[in-house]
Image: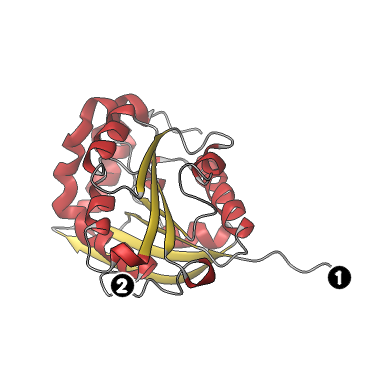
Amino acid sequence: GGVDFDPVPFYNLVGRGVDLLGPLEDGARATLARLLLGLPSGVAGAGGANGAGLKVLEIGCGTGRWAKELLDTPGAETAVTSYVGIDSSETMALAAATELRAWPRARVMHADARAPGVLEDAAGSRLLGGTPDRIAMSYVMDILDEVDQLALLDACRDLLLRGGGVGKLGLCSICQGGPVMSTWQAAWDANPALVGGCRPFDAAALLRRAGWEVEAEERTEVLGYASQIIVASPRLPAAAA
Protein backbone atom coordinates (compact mmCIF):
# COMPACT_ATOMS: atom_id res chain seq x y z
CA GLY A 1 0.00 0.00 0.00
CA GLY A 2 0.88 3.68 0.07
CA VAL A 3 1.22 4.30 3.83
CA ASP A 4 4.85 4.82 4.81
CA PHE A 5 4.72 2.47 7.80
CA ASP A 6 5.75 -1.17 8.07
CA PRO A 7 3.92 -2.76 11.00
CA VAL A 8 6.06 -5.91 11.18
CA PRO A 9 9.33 -4.46 12.60
CA PHE A 10 7.34 -2.06 14.79
CA TYR A 11 5.27 -4.79 16.45
CA ASN A 12 8.21 -7.17 16.61
CA LEU A 13 9.90 -4.48 18.70
CA VAL A 14 6.90 -3.50 20.81
CA GLY A 15 5.80 -7.08 21.54
CA ARG A 16 3.57 -7.46 24.57
CA GLY A 17 3.82 -3.74 25.18
CA VAL A 18 0.88 -3.36 22.81
CA ASP A 19 -1.34 -4.79 25.54
CA LEU A 20 -0.88 -1.57 27.50
CA LEU A 21 -3.76 -0.34 25.34
CA GLY A 22 -5.90 -3.19 26.63
CA PRO A 23 -7.95 -1.09 29.09
CA LEU A 24 -8.91 1.20 26.18
CA GLU A 25 -9.73 -1.61 23.75
CA ASP A 26 -11.01 -4.57 25.77
CA GLY A 27 -14.55 -3.22 25.87
CA ALA A 28 -14.65 -2.99 22.08
CA ARG A 29 -13.26 -6.52 21.78
CA ALA A 30 -15.91 -7.81 24.19
CA THR A 31 -18.54 -6.11 22.05
CA LEU A 32 -17.06 -7.80 19.00
CA ALA A 33 -17.36 -11.22 20.68
CA ARG A 34 -20.97 -10.50 21.57
CA LEU A 35 -22.01 -9.23 18.15
CA LEU A 36 -20.03 -11.71 16.07
CA LEU A 37 -20.21 -14.86 18.17
CA GLY A 38 -23.09 -14.38 20.57
CA LEU A 39 -20.79 -14.74 23.57
CA PRO A 40 -20.92 -14.75 26.55
CA SER A 41 -24.51 -15.97 26.09
CA GLY A 42 -23.16 -18.98 24.18
CA VAL A 43 -25.77 -18.89 21.43
CA ALA A 44 -23.13 -18.03 18.79
CA GLY A 45 -25.58 -16.51 16.36
CA ALA A 46 -26.78 -19.01 13.80
CA GLY A 47 -23.99 -21.48 14.58
CA GLY A 48 -21.67 -23.11 12.12
CA ALA A 49 -22.32 -25.57 9.36
CA ASN A 50 -24.85 -28.31 10.15
CA GLY A 51 -25.63 -26.66 13.50
CA ALA A 52 -22.12 -27.31 14.83
CA GLY A 53 -19.98 -24.79 16.66
CA LEU A 54 -18.17 -22.03 14.87
CA LYS A 55 -14.81 -22.07 13.12
CA VAL A 56 -13.20 -18.70 13.92
CA LEU A 57 -10.35 -17.10 11.98
CA GLU A 58 -8.72 -14.03 13.51
CA ILE A 59 -6.55 -11.84 11.31
CA GLY A 60 -3.97 -9.92 13.31
CA CYS A 61 -4.26 -11.91 16.53
CA GLY A 62 -1.54 -9.94 18.30
CA THR A 63 -0.54 -11.47 21.62
CA GLY A 64 -3.67 -13.64 21.71
CA ARG A 65 -5.41 -11.34 24.17
CA TRP A 66 -8.84 -11.43 22.46
CA ALA A 67 -8.65 -15.15 21.69
CA LYS A 68 -7.72 -16.04 25.27
CA GLU A 69 -10.63 -14.06 26.66
CA LEU A 70 -12.91 -15.54 24.00
CA LEU A 71 -11.95 -19.16 24.63
CA ASP A 72 -12.20 -18.62 28.40
CA THR A 73 -15.75 -17.25 28.13
CA PRO A 74 -18.57 -19.45 29.45
CA GLY A 75 -20.20 -21.17 26.49
CA ALA A 76 -17.14 -20.95 24.25
CA GLU A 77 -16.34 -24.65 24.63
CA THR A 78 -19.43 -25.47 22.54
CA ALA A 79 -19.80 -22.23 20.58
CA VAL A 80 -16.26 -22.29 19.12
CA THR A 81 -15.04 -25.62 17.77
CA SER A 82 -11.80 -24.32 16.25
CA TYR A 83 -9.79 -21.10 16.21
CA VAL A 84 -6.85 -19.96 14.08
CA GLY A 85 -5.04 -16.67 14.65
CA ILE A 86 -2.76 -15.12 12.02
CA ASP A 87 -0.19 -12.44 12.66
CA SER A 88 2.56 -11.02 10.44
CA SER A 89 4.77 -10.26 13.47
CA GLU A 90 6.80 -13.24 14.61
CA THR A 91 6.98 -11.76 18.12
CA MET A 92 3.20 -11.48 18.28
CA ALA A 93 2.59 -14.93 16.81
CA LEU A 94 4.92 -16.54 19.34
CA ALA A 95 3.27 -14.66 22.19
CA ALA A 96 -0.18 -15.74 21.02
CA ALA A 97 0.89 -19.37 20.64
CA THR A 98 2.18 -19.26 24.23
CA GLU A 99 -1.02 -17.71 25.55
CA LEU A 100 -3.24 -20.24 23.75
CA ARG A 101 -1.30 -23.43 24.35
CA ALA A 102 -3.86 -24.58 26.93
CA TRP A 103 -6.59 -24.77 24.25
CA PRO A 104 -6.07 -27.76 21.91
CA ARG A 105 -8.58 -26.40 19.41
CA ALA A 106 -6.59 -23.16 18.95
CA ARG A 107 -3.77 -22.67 16.46
CA VAL A 108 -1.57 -19.69 15.59
CA MET A 109 0.00 -19.04 12.19
CA HIS A 110 2.89 -16.63 11.56
CA ALA A 111 2.03 -15.11 8.17
CA ASP A 112 0.92 -11.89 6.49
CA ALA A 113 -2.78 -12.22 5.73
CA ARG A 114 -2.35 -9.88 2.77
CA ALA A 115 -0.13 -12.41 0.97
CA PRO A 116 -1.82 -14.59 -1.68
CA GLY A 117 -3.06 -17.93 -0.40
CA VAL A 118 -2.52 -17.24 3.32
CA LEU A 119 -6.21 -17.22 4.27
CA GLU A 120 -6.79 -20.39 2.27
CA ASP A 121 -3.87 -22.05 4.06
CA ALA A 122 -5.29 -21.02 7.43
CA ALA A 123 -8.63 -22.59 6.55
CA GLY A 124 -6.97 -25.89 5.66
CA SER A 125 -7.76 -29.13 7.42
CA ARG A 126 -4.59 -29.07 9.54
CA LEU A 127 -5.47 -25.71 11.06
CA LEU A 128 -9.03 -24.39 11.08
CA GLY A 129 -10.60 -27.48 9.56
CA GLY A 130 -12.49 -25.79 6.74
CA THR A 131 -13.99 -22.50 5.64
CA PRO A 132 -14.42 -20.15 8.61
CA ASP A 133 -17.86 -19.29 9.91
CA ARG A 134 -16.55 -16.06 11.40
CA ILE A 135 -13.57 -13.85 10.56
CA ALA A 136 -12.46 -11.31 13.17
CA MET A 137 -10.08 -8.38 12.99
CA SER A 138 -9.28 -6.14 15.95
CA TYR A 139 -7.33 -2.95 15.29
CA VAL A 140 -5.90 -4.25 12.04
CA MET A 141 -7.72 -2.36 9.30
CA ASP A 142 -6.72 0.97 10.82
CA ILE A 143 -3.05 0.10 10.19
CA LEU A 144 -3.58 -0.52 6.47
CA ASP A 145 -4.04 1.95 3.66
CA GLU A 146 -7.18 1.68 1.54
CA VAL A 147 -5.54 -0.41 -1.19
CA ASP A 148 -4.56 -3.09 1.33
CA GLN A 149 -7.85 -2.76 3.17
CA LEU A 150 -9.87 -3.46 0.04
CA ALA A 151 -7.61 -6.33 -1.04
CA LEU A 152 -7.93 -7.98 2.38
CA LEU A 153 -11.70 -7.51 2.39
CA ASP A 154 -11.87 -9.13 -1.05
CA ALA A 155 -9.91 -12.12 0.21
CA CYS A 156 -12.20 -12.42 3.24
CA ARG A 157 -15.29 -12.21 1.05
CA ASP A 158 -14.00 -14.90 -1.31
CA LEU A 159 -13.31 -17.20 1.63
CA LEU A 160 -16.72 -16.68 3.22
CA LEU A 161 -18.55 -17.11 -0.09
CA ARG A 162 -16.75 -20.40 -0.54
CA GLY A 163 -18.63 -21.52 2.54
CA GLY A 164 -21.97 -20.55 1.04
CA GLY A 165 -21.98 -16.89 2.03
CA VAL A 166 -23.49 -17.51 5.48
CA GLY A 167 -20.33 -16.53 7.36
CA LYS A 168 -19.73 -13.11 8.86
CA LEU A 169 -16.88 -10.66 9.29
CA GLY A 170 -16.43 -8.69 12.48
CA LEU A 171 -13.95 -5.93 13.08
CA CYS A 172 -13.16 -3.19 15.51
CA SER A 173 -10.97 -0.21 14.80
CA ILE A 174 -10.37 3.28 16.07
CA CYS A 175 -12.65 5.96 14.65
CA GLN A 176 -13.03 9.71 14.55
CA GLY A 177 -14.82 11.68 17.22
CA GLY A 178 -13.71 14.10 19.89
CA PRO A 179 -10.48 15.90 20.75
CA VAL A 180 -8.52 12.77 21.71
CA MET A 181 -9.03 11.18 18.31
CA SER A 182 -8.34 14.48 16.55
CA THR A 183 -5.00 14.62 18.37
CA TRP A 184 -4.39 10.97 17.46
CA GLN A 185 -5.02 11.78 13.80
CA ALA A 186 -2.62 14.73 13.96
CA ALA A 187 0.07 12.45 15.43
CA TRP A 188 -0.51 9.92 12.64
CA ASP A 189 -0.27 12.70 10.04
CA ALA A 190 3.09 13.74 11.51
CA ASN A 191 4.50 10.20 11.79
CA PRO A 192 2.40 7.00 11.76
CA ALA A 193 4.92 5.22 14.00
CA LEU A 194 3.99 7.58 16.86
CA VAL A 195 0.63 5.77 17.13
CA GLY A 196 1.60 2.29 15.98
CA GLY A 197 0.45 3.01 12.44
CA CYS A 198 -3.21 3.16 13.48
CA ARG A 199 -5.41 5.95 12.16
CA PRO A 200 -9.08 6.71 12.83
CA PHE A 201 -11.40 5.92 9.92
CA ASP A 202 -15.01 4.94 9.19
CA ALA A 203 -15.00 1.14 8.86
CA ALA A 204 -18.73 0.92 8.12
CA ALA A 205 -18.42 3.25 5.14
CA LEU A 206 -15.44 1.28 3.82
CA LEU A 207 -17.30 -2.02 4.10
CA ARG A 208 -20.32 -0.66 2.26
CA ARG A 209 -18.12 0.68 -0.54
CA ALA A 210 -16.46 -2.73 -0.75
CA GLY A 211 -19.77 -4.53 -1.25
CA TRP A 212 -20.58 -5.79 2.26
CA GLU A 213 -23.88 -5.67 4.12
CA VAL A 214 -23.36 -4.01 7.51
CA GLU A 215 -25.56 -5.91 9.96
CA ALA A 216 -24.52 -4.32 13.24
CA GLU A 217 -22.55 -1.26 14.28
CA GLU A 218 -21.66 -0.04 17.76
CA ARG A 219 -19.20 2.39 19.25
CA THR A 220 -17.27 2.42 22.50
CA GLU A 221 -15.27 5.24 24.07
CA VAL A 222 -12.85 5.07 26.99
CA LEU A 223 -11.15 8.30 28.09
CA GLY A 224 -11.83 9.71 24.63
CA TYR A 225 -10.32 6.69 22.83
CA ALA A 226 -13.07 5.81 20.35
CA SER A 227 -13.61 2.43 18.73
CA GLN A 228 -16.09 1.30 16.09
CA ILE A 229 -17.33 -2.30 16.08
CA ILE A 230 -18.87 -3.72 12.91
CA VAL A 231 -20.39 -7.04 11.88
CA ALA A 232 -20.95 -7.52 8.16
CA SER A 233 -21.76 -10.24 5.67
CA PRO A 234 -20.65 -10.53 2.04
CA ARG A 235 -23.22 -9.71 -0.58
CA LEU A 236 -23.97 -12.76 -2.65
CA PRO A 237 -23.15 -12.44 -6.36
CA ALA A 238 -26.14 -11.52 -8.50
CA ALA A 239 -27.70 -14.52 -10.23
CA ALA A 240 -26.92 -14.83 -13.90
CA ALA A 241 -29.72 -13.67 -16.15
Residue 193 in the image: above or below residue 44: above
- The residue shown at (48%, 41%) is 126
- Count of marks, rendered view: 2
Q: Which residue is mark 1?
A: 241
Dot 2 crowding, Cα within 10 Å, few <14, some 14–19, many 20+: some
In the rendered image, which quarter contains the C terminus? bottom right
Dot 1 crowding, Cα within 10 Å, few <14, some 14–19, many 20+: few
Q: Is residue 115 left or right of residue 19?
A: right
- The residue shown at (23%, 37%) is 98
Using the image as rendered, state which of residue 109 and residue 22 is in the foreground: 109
Q: Name the image quarter holding residue 197.
A: top left
Q: Which mark is residue 53?
A: none
Using the image as rendered, state which of residue 143 and residue 83 is in the foreground: 83
Q: Secondary structure at mark 2?
A: loop
Using the image as rendered, state which of residue 2 and residue 71 is in the foreground: 71
Q: Which residue is mark 2?
A: 42
- The residue shown at (24%, 64%) is 220
Residue 192 in the image: above or below residue 241: above
